[in-house]
Amino acid sequence: MEYVTAAPYPRSETASARSGRRSLALALLCGALGAAMALLSTRQRWSEGTATVAGGAFPLTARGSDVTGVPAALAIVGLAALVAVFAVRRTGRLAVSALLALSGAGIMATALIGASDGSALDEQAAKASGDTSATVASFTHTAWPYAAAAGGALILLAGLLALRYGRRWPAMSGRYERDGTPRPRRAARPADPDRPEEMWKALDRGEDPTGAGPA
């Protein structure tokens, strides 16, 4: 008697599956952590300075959301794109992965620009002094803009991983998708001979009430 053993999976396929799982876990971690960092950073103090008023120097501070609202908005877009990666396939997944990467790049750019932007403090100085031409003095910035930029870098990395390895990642089950394909019809059950009304209904539909089919 001969015993037939199942052929092992090729090593290349096993390695590909492992790399796909690792890249998926890393992308999820980077995307979620990056979005949290960007959202948290925009609520912190980004810059501070002083305005000269009649009573002397008046301290002013500006949060990230006062300087720019782009990082927070792009962080939300990045989170949505990270989730949408698993809801689409092929070209759609490629497009969503690109959006994820662009969201991270946009957060980095706007956060770094906002680190040296004193317009929010100038507006506060004008309100405090009553002079529209007043500007803030001794302008300094904190490390929070760079924390937001680091969050954007993590989202960018998640997008690049999705672009590179996204085709190996799982997608939503096909039972949740509607492709317009008609479902197969169930086979007609033979009519119950004890219920004449069912036999008449089967005849009206053009079916054989006995279920025997053509002879």
Image (cartoon, rainbow, N blue to C red):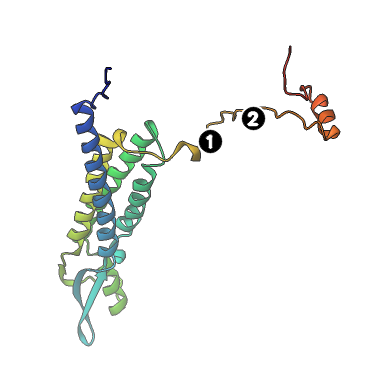
Horizontal side of 194 relative to 50 (left or right) equals: right
Where is residue 72, by image quadrant?
Answer: bottom left
Element type at marker 1? Answer: loop
Residue 194 screen position, x and y as percent: 82, 34
Horizontal side of 79 relative to 14 (left or right) equals: right
Give the residue at x 20% y 61%: 145
Residue type of the residue flagged with mark 1: Arg
Mark drawn on residue 46: none
- Which residue occupies the foreground of this view, 104 or 84? 84
Residue 142 screen position, x and y as percent: 16, 67
Where is residue 113, by image quadrant?
Answer: bottom left
Binning the other alpha carbons within 10 Å of mark 1 as few (below 14), some (14 to 19) or many (20 upward) gives: few
Question: Residue tagged by mark 1?
Answer: 178
Residue 210 screen position, x and y as percent: 76, 24
Element type at marker 2? Answer: loop
- Which residue occupies the foreground of this view, 192 or 103? 192
Q: Which mark is in front, 1 or 2?
A: 2
Mark drawn on residue 186: 2
Q: Earlier in the sequence, mark 1 or mark 2?
A: 1
